[in-house]
Structures are given as C-alpha cells and as structure tokens.
Image: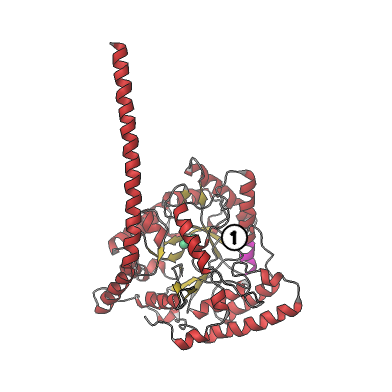
Amino acid sequence: MVRRSARNAAKEPATTTTTTTTTDPHEEAIKTETNGAEADSEELKQRNKRKASASEPKPQSVDSPEADSPEEEESKPEPKKRKTTSSTKLSSQQEQTEMPLAPRTAVNTLRRAMYIGAHVSAAGGVHNSIPNAIHIGANAFALFLKSQRKWTSPPLADDAKNQFHALIKQHGYDATKHVVPHASYLINLAQADAAKAKQAYDCFLDDLKRCEALGIGLYNFHPGSAGPGGDMKAACGRIAAQLNKAIKATKSVVVLLENMCGSGNVVGGRFEELADIISQVEDKSRIGVCLDTCHAFTAGYDLRTPEAFAQTLAEFDRTIGLKYLKALHLNDSKAPYHSNRDLHANIGTGFLGLRAFHNIMNCPTLENLPMVLETPIEEKDAKGKTVENKQIWADEIKLLESLIGMDVESEEFNRLECELQKKGAAERRRIEEQVEKKATKEKKKLDGGKKERGAMDAFVVKKKGEGEA
Ligand SMILES: [Zn+2]
Ligand SMILES: [Zn+2]
C-alpha cells in the first residue's frame, strides 16, 4: 500500500484540513442529545474526547464553512461572498477530481462488480461529496445530507442541488444505486414520547425528501433505541409505524435499516428485529437493510472463515431475506467477536481480519451493492495535531478491490494479512483487555448479587423453617 506522496499532500486542497468531520458516522454522533438513539457512554466519551482534539482549529474564512453544516454556507445571503466561495470551491473541486489520491477503478475491469467507497465529507454543500469521493477513487459513497448534530437545517440550496445533479452525471455515478446517505444520529424512530417521536419523524422525512430532490435511491439509518425497559417488540412496532408514514409521504427512496452491535436497548443487533420491522412495513419495495460488518461481528454474526461467512449470509436470508440486502458498511472491528462494542478498525487490522473481507469481495451475492468504508482516518501529524489522512481510504479501496480473485494461499495474501494484523495488534490487545475487564466486573456484580440473594433465600428458608417448627 502506497502512502501519500509529498507532492500529493501538497496538492491537497486547503479546505481538507479544516473539513475534519463526516468521516466515520459512527465516530461522529453524539455530542448533542440523541433523542434516545445511541448508548454506550464509555465509548461516547472516548470519541468525543478524540473529536474535540480533531476539530480544534478552524480558520474562519468563507472558504471553510463549518464542516458539519453542509448547507449553512449556501444559506448566507451575501452574494459577493458566495461568488468567492464557489469559485474557490470550483478550483478545490478541480484539484480533488484531477489530482486524485488514487484513480477510480473501472468496475467492469474487476472480476466481480464491486462498488467500493467511503463515507465522505459534504462540508460546504452536498455536491462537495462527489469530488471528495473521486479524490479517494470511490465508486460508491455515503454522506450526511445536513448537519447530523442539529434537528433543523436550512433547506437544500438550489445551487447545491443543481451542482450535485451535474457532477453525478459528469462523473458517471448512479445515485439511485451507489450513493447511500447516512441519517443523523439524533433520529430515534423508536421513541415512545409523542413530542420527541414527532421531532425524529420530521427530521427523518426531511432527509428522505432531500434524497428524492437529489435523485438518491437509498437512505441508511439506525433503527433506534427501545429506551428504558427495552421492550424490543414494541420498539419495532413504533419504528415500522413511523416508516409507513414516511414512505407514504415520499415517492421512491428506499430506507435501509442498519444492523447494530447489540448493545443495551439498541434495536437491530439481531436479524430477527430487522425482520420484525420489515414484516410490518406495508410497501416492501421501499425497505431494505444495510449490513455493517463490524456491527454484525460484534453482535455475534461471524464472517471470518468462508464457512462462518456463508452461515451468516444463510441466516440473513432465512430471517430477513437476501433480497432486502441493499448496501454494506465495510469496517474491521477493534473489539472481539460478540463483544457488542462498536469500534471500527481499518481493514485487516481488527478482529475480523483480511480473510473476512476476502470472503465479502468474492461473494457473488454482494455484487453491484454499494460498499462504504467507515474506517478511521485520523492521524497525528508532525506537530502532534490530529489530521485526516484520506490516503487511508484510497488505499483501502484498492486493497479491497485487489482481494477479488486473490488466492488466499498466495504469498501476497499472507504478506498482506500478516502486515495488517501486526499493525492493529496493540489496539486489539488494548480493547480486548477493556472488554475482559468489563466482563469480569459484570460477572463479579452478578455473582455478588447471586450470593446476596442466596444468603437471603437461605435466611428466609431458615426463618420459615423456624416458624414452622
Ligand atoms: Zn451507521
Ligand atoms: Zn455503519
């Protein structure tokens, strides 16, 4: 894997260093109140800590709008500033597209029709997602349609919409199939509280309408959280009811439930839960699933060996139906199998390992589906500042494409597999220790509880016996 050359690094547009966000949606979430959507506080704290350092200095200039507010720039009324912005944007776009970190592979030259990309930034307007995708050689991509941390955003600007359509056409992306926006984390369609449920619904519907205005055919979201008490069945019912309403209010976009890692009361860790929601959706042509490999693995669906992978796909087919599988998120996992933790790792460096991705890349069932990387790309630069290195995605896309048809017994595969596992070893160990510690703590708590209960039971029995005697 070639790292970015100094020349390319220098050529990277100035805006790149300031558009620090929208890389890994799972790392994004969260600073705001989440409408009950996400859980694991320990992980959130870690991510927020990292995010805070990652997004520190943002030069205030018209050329670098707030990364998380894709539409904000367009909504500013001052025409003069806007002109400056768009001409600068254009040259930045040109650089992105003319000097990519890696060229896009023509899918028809691959032995299997695999459309691989990443969740790219849409800072400055949704249209910017396209040069950002081209920059890393992506044949499919995800983006946020608006700020994922705010409940309301300015309407989709005509200029951004028109540029999106023009660029999609110019660069030959199929927006109906290979562009999969990710919903805001604020949205929890399982919300039981009426006012909060309406807020979530409005935000969701607004996103679906944006998809349709942009000619986008798929939209991916986290099913939601069942809330205190965790009645999954009732939560699935509420999600389906919201979906039925939103589907009726729109024309064509297919909504994709993302499988989750099965922590706490989050809906979607089990395939059965997704199937339950789908069974209650009236228009089956408008519902599907986006399979996240990291979530599946830590939820207990193995993908590592060809046999385990086939078994997981068979289980998906049996419970949900493979015809509903419309997109994939390709992430390795820093956390071990069945740990219910959501920590994305770079391809091949995690507990899934390169073999799992070899299984995926050689699976005919998955051909033509959009495959989106949500792997970490933050690195420390020479001064210790956290910066994004998009070369990582460019390299991962090429790595995944190279796995198509690769012999797993070959020296090349073995070398790659070993190199990548070695690279991720320290991080795997660190997270594994965390997981083990937590498990021991919980076991102790459970055992302690049992002992106490046991002592109490014995006491009650003894008392009872005394009384009877
Ligand atoms: Zn997601
Ligand atoms: Zn995902």
**Horizontal and vertical percent position of residue 13:** 56, 82
Q: Which part of the image, by quadrant, shows the C terminus?
A: top left
Q: Quadrant of residue 70?
A: bottom right
Farthest bottom residue? 7
Q: Quadrant of residue 254?
A: bottom right
Disc 1 marks which amino acid?
Arg
The residue under the point 46% across, 59% down is 46
Please state if 122 lies on the left or on the right of 104 as rendered. Answer: right
Query: Where 387 falls versus 211 (above or below)?
Result: below
**Horizontal and vertical percent position of residue 220:** 52, 61
The residue under the point 57% across, 43% down is 192
**Horizontal and vertical percent position of residue 18:** 56, 74
Query: Where 120 falls versus 43 (above or below)?
Result: below
Which secondary structure class fits the magenta region best? helix
- On whether ligand 1 comes within 8 Å of the CB at mark 1, the answer is no
Query: Where 457 falls versus 197 (above or below)?
Result: above
Residue that numbered label 1 is attached to: 149
Q: What is the span of residues highlighted in magenta in the rendered image?
A: 207-214
